[in-house]
């Protein structure tokens, strides 16, 4: 890589980082507004879910273009794990509880995950086959209707 | 070292531990290098070795936790982007979300009794199968401790990621929708990342199932808290 190419690459990634930060800040502002909305109208819903609904509405009405928040949202969702590491670290204060119940917890978590994983897959597999048949027969009916005309 | 310096050091440790693990996993690809496992292990080890007290650890890192709120809102973008898939399989997705939510809550509730977990833990683990921003919001309705919830959500993700391969073979789960929905409902973010290894449709279905199960959990938590706790 020549020096010129290196400079151009650096400039591009700096621009991308700036854009990401700006868009993430816009989403933070929206979160703050949604929180205010919930407090002001005393809504029985959490601010995050209200904000999500409002943003989805704004995107659907095309008042907010998808592209204008894409990079910021991708960062917030891609690095979600980073944002909940601090509470995970603080479990060291529950060391005694976890030492005492560690084995039970592991058994509990494995049994629960097996249930949800297999149960959901079983339900979806059946519903999916039904819905696919439904779609196919609907499309077939439309084609036949079209041919009859 | 003074309080503030330890606070700054903690923030640096957290950022380096997380982004370092992420890069390493990108290069190596071993399951034990997955950031969901390696990053907390590295950071806890550093905090214990350097003997950093928790109040100092939280001085600056608590700003990271504040970003969970905006992250919830950012989920609007993938929902909007995948509207075509939602329109194609509305019944399958809805029932997948309902099955995932009910199985997650009721299996946790029953298994807490079976494994005789104490109330402090028992109340914190009910929301374990949904994504963290939603779990942290919903757990308070059940009287859970957010820190314990964060940990079990993380462990649930790791376990789901490790178990899905053998379980899919055992249960003969082959359709993309079933695999995606199962991963999204049982292992949230880690499951959605794992689903990408199976295929693009699996990944999208996993993300959507994860998001909708999370929203449904937050909205129904007060009701289920009346019934279950």
Image (cartoon, coloured by chain):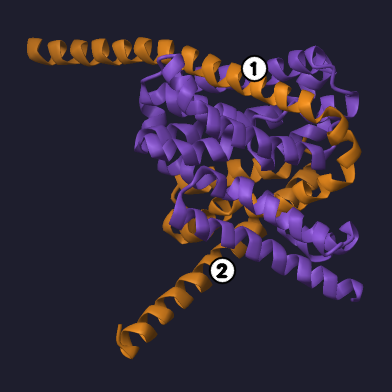
Chain colours: A orange, B purple
In the rendering, at what x and y percent does residue B155 appear? 67, 36
Q: Residues within 10 Å of mark 2 (few under 14, many from 20)?
A: some
In the rendering, at what x and y percent does residue A106 appear? 72, 27
Q: CA distance from mark 1 to mark 2?
A: 39 Å
> Is any atom of residue A65 visible in this view?
no
In the rendering, at what x and y percent does residue A72 appear? 53, 60
Point out the image quarter for the N terminus of chain A: bottom left
In depth, the one of B102 and A26 nearer the eye is B102
In depth, the one of B66 and A104 nearer the eye is A104
In depth, the one of B53 and B196 nearer the eye is B53
Please name the residue shown 84% across and 17% down the image.
B116
| Secondary element at tag 1 | helix
Subunit that carries the residue with mark 2: A
Name the mark on residue B155: none
Q: Is residue B75 left or right of residue B202?
A: right
The picture quadrant where one finds residue B62 is bottom right
- Comparing labels 1 and 2, the label whose residue is closer to the camera: 1
Which residue in the protein does label 1 denote? B102
Q: Residues within 10 Å of mark 1 (few under 14, many from 20)?
A: some
- In the rendered image, the residue lying farthest to the bottom is A3
Point out the image quarter for the C terminus of chain A: top left
Which residue in the protein does label 2 denote? A22
Q: Is residue B113 above or below residue A27?
A: above
The picture quadrant where one finds residue B91 is top left
| Secondary element at tag 2 | helix
- In the rendered image, the residue lying farthest to the front is B49
């Amino acid at each position: 890589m020549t020096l010129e190419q290196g400079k151009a690459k650096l400039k591009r990634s700096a621009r991308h980082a700036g854009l990401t930060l700006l868009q993430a800040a816009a989403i933070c502002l929206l979160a703050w507004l949604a929180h205010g909305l919930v407090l002001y109208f005393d809504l029985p819903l959490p601010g995050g879910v209200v904000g999500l609904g409002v943003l989805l509405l704004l995107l659907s009405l095309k008042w907010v273009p998808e592209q204008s928040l894409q990079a910021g949202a991708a960062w917030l969702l891609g690095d979600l794990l980073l944002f909940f590491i601090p509470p995970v670290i603080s479990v060291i204060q529950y060391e005694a509880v976890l030492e005492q119940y560690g084995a039970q917890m592991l058994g509990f978590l494995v049994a629960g995950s097996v249930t949800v994983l297999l149960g959901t897959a079983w339900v979806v597999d059946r519903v999916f086959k039904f819905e696919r048949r439904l779609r196919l027969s609907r499309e077939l009916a439309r084609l036949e209707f079209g041919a009859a005309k | 070292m003074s309080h503030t310096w330890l606070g700054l050091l903690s923030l640096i440790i957290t950022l380096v531990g997380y982004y370092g693990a992420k890069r390493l996993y990108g290069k190596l690809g071993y399951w034990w290098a997955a950031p969901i496992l390696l990053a907390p292990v590295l950071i806890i080890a550093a905090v214990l070795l350097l003997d950093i007290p928790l109040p100092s650890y939280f001085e600056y890192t608590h700003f990271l936790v504040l970003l969970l709120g905006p992250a919830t809102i950012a989920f609007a973008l993938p929902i909007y982007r995948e509207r075509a898939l939602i329109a194609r399989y509305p019944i399958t997705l809805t029932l997948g979300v309902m099955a995932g939510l009910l199985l997650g809550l009721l299996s946790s509730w029953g298994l807490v009794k079976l494994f005789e977990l104490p109330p402090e833990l028992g109340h914190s683990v009910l929301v374990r199968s949904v994504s963290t921003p939603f779990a942290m919001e919903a757990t308070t309705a059940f009287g859970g401790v957010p820190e314990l919830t964060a940990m079990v959500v993380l462990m649930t993700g790791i376990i789901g990621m490790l178990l899905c391969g053998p379980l899919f073979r055992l249960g003969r789960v082959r359709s993309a929708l079933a695999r995606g929905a199962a991963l999204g409902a049982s292992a949230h973010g880690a499951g959605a990342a794992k689903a990408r290894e199976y295929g693009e449709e699996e990944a999208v279905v996993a993300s959507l199932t994860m998001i909708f199960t999370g929203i449904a959990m937050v909205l129904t938590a007060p009701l289920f808290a009346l019934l279950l706790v």
